[in-house]
Image (cartoon, grey):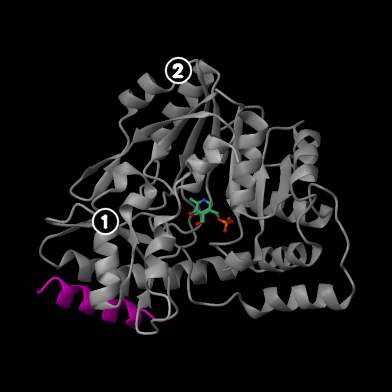
Amino acid sequence: MRQVIRDLPGSKIREVANAALGRSDVLPFWFGESDEATPAHIRDAAVKSLSAGETFYSHNLGLAELREALAHYASGLHRPIDASRIAVTSSGVNALMLAMQALVGAGDEVVAVTPVWPNLTAQPAILGARVVRLALRAERGTWRLDLDELRHTVTAHTRVLLINSPNNPTGWTLTRAEQEILLAHCRSTGTWIVADEVYERVYFAGVPGACAPSFLDIAEPDDRLLVVHSFSKSFLMTGWRLGWIVAPPGLGPELAKLIEFNTSCAPVFVQRAGLAALSQADTSVPELVGRLRACRDTLLPRLTALPGITVAEPAGGLYAFFSVEGESDSLALAKRLVAEAGLGLAPGAAFGPEGEGWLRWCFASRDPARLVVGVERLQRFLGL
Ligand SMILES: Cc1ncc(COP(=O)(O)O)c(C=O)c1O
């Protein structure tokens, strides 16, 4: 086994979840998904596809209908995007790995804005790249990017800037002005931007149904930009493993080769489910985000009211990221919360050293009352 694989850290979120194995009294908020099942019209489309015998390979880049539908969907949210620029992938995390494989080789420098979901930094490391962490800084619970530091860190030696906004775990979301600066800077250094925008629709600022600022709103088609998307979060489809990439024109055949050697294609019945999801996106996504907003608005004021807790309202994403005064070992704290309070949270250290001392609470739930019970458990644990 390559040393780089041996050196990969195991998931600290799993470590906490494993500590609760066999305990039905623990309320789990550790993973990044709702307890709400995928809507029926999406499940039905998959069943129909399987019943019709659609059990064969598809084109490497996905069904033509799905690529057209994704181009239409993305063009409605952003600047016009041609279907030839879309590659269907087997999940967002697969899209990220394909983006990395397409751009990064051994010894290349990748700058990642952190803290971040650990898969983003593990993937370039697996490929032998050198990952430089560019840390967001917390001020009273709100996370900010230092643009001067970014300009200093991303140089002509930087192959890829890896950025996830809205961010998992902090909820930090790039502003349009920041995006413009980043894009201009990366154009000047010749750096690719890999933008993980899987939470773009899970955005609470602006009018209902609004989308978080996206690089697809401002970039030219031939900019060095790969945008990674997923059906997981906006369509309640985490278990289906379906995502897509928006790439500059002309890269389709290259991505097709890479997909051939990774998964060959996404399963056709899953792609049919994706088509059904997109067909009702205009209503289903704003409704889902409305429910998620209710969850956020249940959890955040209750957390904020607790003495010793530092937290800010997230602009996007599924998470409240908070610190507890006097607690600096997030993994130990998360394990004690499981053992002593029956509360399952993700330790901030899972997202890198910048997240140490923090905890991540996924607030996506069918029933916001679960969140109220969770806060009561935290309150009791803290002796408040
Ligand atoms: C920031 C980020 N990117 C990508 C993904 C991947 O999503 P999936 O592989 O389920 O499509 C996740 C999932 O939690 C995530 O948090």
Residue 280 in picture, x, y percent from top left: 65, 69
Q: Is residue 104 visible?
A: yes
Residue annotated with mark 1 = 330
Residue 217 in picture, x, y percent from top left: 55, 39
Q: Is residue 313 left or right of residue 194?
A: left
**Residue 78: mark:** none
SS type, badge 1:
helix
Is residue 76 positioned above or below 36 on the image?
A: above
Residue 258 in picture, x, y percent from top left: 75, 39
Q: Residue reaching furthest front? A: 1
Residue annotated with mark 2 = 155
Q: How many marks?
A: 2
SS type, badge 2:
loop
Is the stretch drawn in magenta largely helix, strand or loop?
A: helix
**What's drawn in magenta, residue-wise?**
367-384
Mark with earlier residue (1, 2)? 2
Residue visible at 26% across and 70% down?
337
Q: Given the image, on which type of amino acid does mark 1 rest? A: Ser
Front residue (pair 110, 37) = 110
